[in-house]
Image: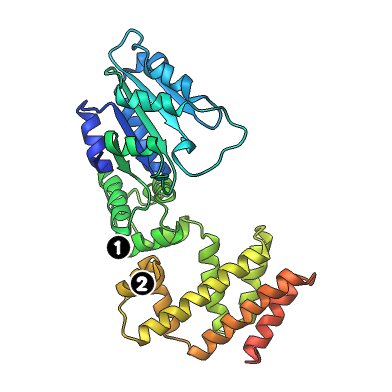
Amino acid sequence: MKKIQYTELLKNLASNQTQPIYLILGQEDYLEQQIQDAFQALVPSEEREMNIGNYDMEITSLGVALDDATSAPFFGERRVVFVRNPYFLTGERHKGGPDQDVEGLQAYIDHPVDSTVLVLFASYEKLDGRKKIVKTLNKQATTIQIGNLNTSQINQLVKNQLNSKKYTISSEALDQLLFRTDSKLSRMMNELPKLMLYNIKEKKITTESVDALVSKSLDQNVFDLSNVVLQKKSKEAIDIYQSLITQQEQPLRINAVLVGQFRLLLQVKILQNQGFSQGDIAGKLKVHPYRVKLAMQTSRRFSMQDLTMGYTGLTDLDLQLKSTQKDPELLFELFLLRFIGQQIA
């Protein structure tokens, strides 16, 4: 198996250098679309309808895709065949779908058609390495991993996209964009057009524009909520909580994220007191460095007692939400009253 980077793949395809079989591993919608476009560009636009096949294995037989792959191009030089959701490469069980000719795929991989480029999009965390077909792909397919991008890779892809439009972005704005999009590359790329339009004169994306245009996720809203809870600002905390309920967020989900935020604050404070740096903490907890940076700034302002009591009170609230029929907003207000009065057991 030959492993190559996403950027190398695009460079090769742009220069018309192809391999017979590709395996695209992991899930990242933006990169997947870029890769698909690059493969489609191998076929002249007037030939694409007849010489590009797209097959979803959850609803289509593998045999149909293989029939297409073994066919000669129709009035052209190359055929491209996309195979999506190849669940038979994983340990997952699939009910109700068509029977899949995995042995036929095995035979095709052993003797691929020169005029066909076969591309398997395996949007999974991992494949079942015990399966013969997976072992064969590992040996003979060109593999590109597009899932589990690290922060540095995501940052570079965003900067490259902005540079191609002659824009720049401040490091603080990039951190904020990462945070508000939960470090999801596809979401970040979707936000760029309106950010560029907003900053069309200066050609520089600022923190202020990110704050103004990129909406907060549940995690970010709960981050704000945890801060006002710790500051014992009951009215602001209730306002944020009610706003989340109005947005159709479920009380159990809100509380679960709150528990997670307080747990993070506790972990960060403990590790910080032990002399760990921001980078070390991020690596140890497997948390985005910007989240750790914010957690360090927050935890410094509050005592271990406050963080522990908040965490204990929220875990108790979780039990109440699951075991009683009481109004969730009332239970949250009671938690606040006990926390502010330092009466959480």
Could you say which is closer to the camera, residue 21 or residue 164?
A: 21
Could you say which is closer to the camera, residue 275 or residue 247?
A: 275
Query: Mark 2 or 1 closer to N-term?
Result: 1
Judging by the rendered image, the residue that carries numbered circle 1 is 171
In the rendered structure, are the residues bearing label 2 and label 1 in contact, judged by CB atoms less than 8 Å apart?
Answer: no
Question: Can you give x and y, in whole percent of width and height, for residue 215 in the image?
Answer: 51, 57
Residue 321: quadrant of the picture: bottom right
Could you say which is closer to the camera, residue 255 or residue 298?
A: 255
Question: Can you give x and y, in whole percent of width and height, for residue 134 in the image?
Answer: 37, 38
Does residue 45 appear to the left or right of 85 in the view shown?
left
Q: Is residue 202 visible?
A: no
Q: Quadrant of the N terminus?
A: top left
Tag 1: residue type?
Answer: Ser
Secondary-structure class at tag 2: helix
Tag 2: residue type?
Answer: Lys
Q: How is the image coloured?
A: rainbow
Judging by the rendered image, the residue that carries numbered circle 2 is 284
Q: Residue at x 57, y 38 (%)?
A: 94
